[in-house]
Image (cartoon, rainbow, N blue to C red):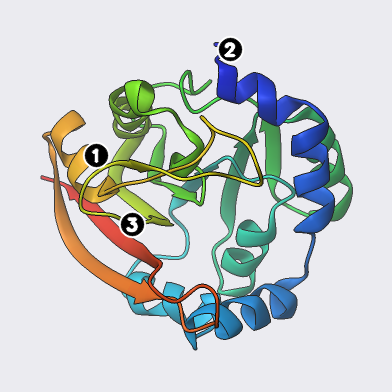
């Protein structure tokens, strides 16, 4: 499995602390999103995935303990898989999820064959990948997806590093739909929506949900 400064960081104590901090059930996740954006995550998902067959094979890259997979399962998706770099989170996910496969793996080297999934997605994961690896992870997502790439990430017009809890070199905001389209030219943008933060102290920050489809 490919190791970088970022993957090593997330496999250590910082990643474990993140996992403990972000454990939530479906309603807990929706409450967090309503506080940040004025809209629950389930509602956002429905806007982007309303016409997509719930029986498609879906892969989440960087699933942590499966908060987003649980939301998709509750929405009716039945063939869900996650990969996660952090062993602690994988073990915790296996204990809490039912009928969802989670394995340890990296988005830089996805352990599945070409086109095995119909939809590959990330949620708050690409922002923690160093810019020099953006093209590689985007190409890996495109390689494994037979039809869709979906994402929800921190947005900026130009790639910008952000201090992350006192650490440098572990968080960037960027135009990820553009980055993915450039690295995976067979995919075109279907939908893109910006979600500005409404919480005091967070105003000025923006996240982006996007859906790309293979031509």
**Image position, residue 110 (x, y; %):** 49, 23
Q: Quadrant of residue 9?
A: top right
Q: Residue at x 38, y 72 (%)?
A: 204
- Circle 3 or circle 2, nearest the eye: 3
Residue assigned mark 1: 180
Residue furthest bottom as drawn: 38
Q: Residue 157 or 185: which is nearer the viewer?
A: 157
Q: Element under label 3?
A: loop
Position of the N terminus, as image quadrant, is top right
- Rounded to the nearest angstrom, the CA distance separating label 2 from label 1 is 21 Å
Residue assigned mark 2: 3
- Give the left or right position of residue 174, taking residue 27 as reference: left
Q: Residue 183 or 116: which is nearer the viewer?
A: 183
Q: Earlier in the sequence, mark 3 or mark 1?
A: 3
Q: Which mark is residue 155?
A: 3
Crowd band around label 3 with a 10 angstrom C-alpha radius: few (<14), some (14–19), many (20+): many
Crowd band around label 1 with a 10 angstrom C-alpha radius: few (<14), some (14–19), many (20+): many
- Rounded to the nearest angstrom, the CA distance separating label 3 from label 1 is 13 Å
- Rounded to the nearest angstrom, the CA distance separating label 3 from label 2 is 25 Å
Q: Residue 118 or 41: which is nearer the viewer?
A: 41
Q: Element under label 2?
A: loop
- Give the left or right position of residue 99, taking residue 47 as reference: right
Q: Residue at x 28, y 41 (%)?
A: 159
**Image position, residue 114 (x, y; %):** 35, 23
């Amino acid at each position: 499995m490919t190791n970088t400064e970022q993957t090593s960081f997330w496999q250590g104590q910082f990643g474990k602390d993140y996992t403990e901090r972000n454990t939530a059930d479906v309603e807990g996740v929706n409450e967090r999103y309503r506080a940040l954006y004025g809209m629950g995550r389930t509602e956002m998902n429905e806007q982007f995935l309303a016409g997509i067959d719930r029986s498609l094979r879906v892969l989440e890259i960087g699933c942590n303990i499966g908060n987003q997979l649980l939301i998709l399962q509750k929405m009716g998706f039945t063939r869900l898989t996650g990969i996660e770099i952090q062993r602690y989170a994988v073990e915790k996910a296996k204990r809490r999820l039912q009928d969802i496969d989670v394995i340890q793996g990296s988005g830089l080297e996805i352990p599945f064959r070409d086109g095995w999934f119909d939809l590959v997605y990330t949620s708050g994961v690409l922002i923690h990948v160093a810019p020099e690896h953006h093209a590689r992870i985007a190409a890996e997502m495109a390689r494994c997806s037979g039809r869709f790439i979906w994402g929800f990430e921190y947005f900026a017009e130009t790639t910008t590093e952000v201090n992350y809890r006192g650490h440098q070199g572990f968080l960037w905001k960027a135009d990820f739909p553009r980055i993915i389209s450039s690295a995976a030219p067979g995919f075109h943008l279907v939908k893109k929506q910006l979600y500005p933060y409404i919480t005091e102290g967070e105003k000025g920050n923006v996240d982006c949900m996007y859906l790309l489809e293979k031509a």
